[in-house]
């Protein structure tokens, strides 16, 4: 299985976000804001989690412009961090392919 890897600059362009910080930061997956994970991207969309932003170990975060100055890590700035994070989750964790068919041992109760 090949792991997808993108720079933060590539993700900013792909999802129409403003980049804050090092665009060469490599991202290989998504994570929660707390505790976060190196090489992964998290998001902040609620004031209730601002405290976690200062302590995150995530490689980058997606957040609104109002929270940009508080970010200790590179960031993607978006008016809708939830939506961007949903797209990121789909990019890094695509759904499993569904193979249509009927299993040979399947039975239907009459």
Image (cartoon, rainbow, N blue to C red):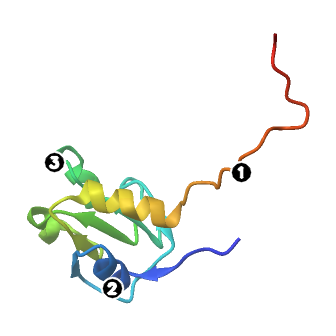
Total labels drawn: 3
Residue 31 place in picture, x, y as percent: 44, 58
60 relative position to 103: left or right: left
Q: Residues within 10 Å of mark 2 (few under 14, many from 20)?
A: many
Residue 33 place in picture, x, y as percent: 36, 55
Q: Residue furthest right?
A: 105
Q: Say which of marks 3 and 1 sits in front.
A: 1
25 relative position to 15: left or right: right
Answer with mark 3 or mark 2, whichever residue precedes in sequence.
Answer: 2
Residue 36 place in picture, x, y as percent: 42, 59
Q: Quadrant of the N terminus?
A: bottom right
Q: For mark 1, what is the residue?
A: 99
Of residues 110 and 36, which is closer to you in this image? Answer: 110
Q: CA distance from mark 3 to mark 1?
A: 42 Å
Q: Quadrant of residue 88?
A: bottom left
**Image point 24% across, 48% down: which residue?**
49
Q: For mark 3, what is the residue?
A: 47
Query: Any mark on residue 9, and which?
Result: 2
**Image point 33% across, 85% down: which residue?**
9
């Amino acid at each position: 299985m090949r792991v997808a890897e993108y720079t933060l600059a590539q993700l900013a362009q792909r999802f129409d976000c403003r980049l804050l910080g090092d665009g060469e930061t490599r991202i290989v997956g998504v994570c929660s804001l707390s505790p976060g994970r190196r090489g992964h991207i998290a998001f902040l969309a609620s004031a209730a989690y601002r405290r976690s932003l200062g302590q995150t170990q995530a490689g980058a975060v997606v957040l609104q412009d109002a929270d940009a100055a508080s970010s200790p890590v590179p960031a993607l700035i978006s008016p809708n961090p939830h939506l961007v994070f949903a797209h990121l989750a789909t990019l890094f964790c695509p759904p499993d392919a569904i193979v249509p068919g009927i299993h040979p041992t399947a039975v239907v109760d009459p």
